[in-house]
Image (cartoon, rainbow, N blue to C red):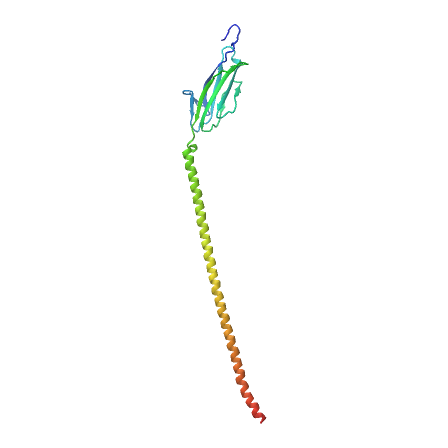
């Protein structure tokens, strides 16, 4: 209990209040049922928190924590807004407590539920659709690559087959020409042998008559 004569709070902690909640663009919103809903792109806010003590307000200390964001309690020793920027979609609980310098913290304090609604591109359904679309694009890309690779392979096989057929045909023609050349060479040899025989026979007869 506050004693005006002694100027002491008799150990009673101050009362914590949230005076104002302001968005990043300066718009002020009123908490409804200790609950604030932020819609995209409003993912930042400022909170004015005070600990009321009529006797010694300069000795009041405030600590706060945003469950789901802050890991430990944070103390505020100056009267300035508490700011949170770029909060991810989800639910948070803001808790603030006050105490006199050296005294005990207020047991309950003040609580504010903060809900950050996701933007349309952050919704689970949209992300699922985008993931399926990306998967479909990947599958289409793989299919197109396989088709291109198959066409290239078919063209290569066709080219190899055509060149193999042309080489086989050229080889056959070369073998045919070689056979014809061999046959012509054999006929030439036979002709020369026949001519040699035909010419030698009259000469033998002439020589025989000359010897007589």
* Residue at the spot 52% in from the left edge and 82% down from the top edge: 195
* Residue at the spot 55% in from the left edge and 85% down from the top edge: 200
Q: Position of residue 186 (x, y in %)?
A: 51, 76
Residue sitting farthest toward the right: 211
Residue sitting farthest toward the front: 107
Q: Is residue 149 above or below residue 5?
A: below
Question: Between residues 75 and 48, which one lies in front from this camera angle?
Answer: 75
Quarter placement of the C terminus:
bottom right
Q: Position of residue 94 (x, y in %)?
A: 47, 22
Q: Is residue 77 above or below residue 41?
A: above
Q: Is residue 194 above or below residue 138?
A: below
Q: Position of residue 31 (x, y in %)?
A: 42, 20
> How many marks can you see?
0
Could you say which quadrant of the image residue 203 lies in? Answer: bottom right
* Residue at the spot 53% in from the left edge and 78% down from the top edge: 189
Residue sitting farthest toward the top: 5
Q: Position of residue 201 (x, y in %)?
A: 54, 87
Residue sitting farthest toward the bottom: 212
Could you say which quadrant of the image residue 129 lies in? Answer: top left
* Residue at the spot 45% in from the left edge and 48% down from the top edge: 146
């Amino acid at each position: 209990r506050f004693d005006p004569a002694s100027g002491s709070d008799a150990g009673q902690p101050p009362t914590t209040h949230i005076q104002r909640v302001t968005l990043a663009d300066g718009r002020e919103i009123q908490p409804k049922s200790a609950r604030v809903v932020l819609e995209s792109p409003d993912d930042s806010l400022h909170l004015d928190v005070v600990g009321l003590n009529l006797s010694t307000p300069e000795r009041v200390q405030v600590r706060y924590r945003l469950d789901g964001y802050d890991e430990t309690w944070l103390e505020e020793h100056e009267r300035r807004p508490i700011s949170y920027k770029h909060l991810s979609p989800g639910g948070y609980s803001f808790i603030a407590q006050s105490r006199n310098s050296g005294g005990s913290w207020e047991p309950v304090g003040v609580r504010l539920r903060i809900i950050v609604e996701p933007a349309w591109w952050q919704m689970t359904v949209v992300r699922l659709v985008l993931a399926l679309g990306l998967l479909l694009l990947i599958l289409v890309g793989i299919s197109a690559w396989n088709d291109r690779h198959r066409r290239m392979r078919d063209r290569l096989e066709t080219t190899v087959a055509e060149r193999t057929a042309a080489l086989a045909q050229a080889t056959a023609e070369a073998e045919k020409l070689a056979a014809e050349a061999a046959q012509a060479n054999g006929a030439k040899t036979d002709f020369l042998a026949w001519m040699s025989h035909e010419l030698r026979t009259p000469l033998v007869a002439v020589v025989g008559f000359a010897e007589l």
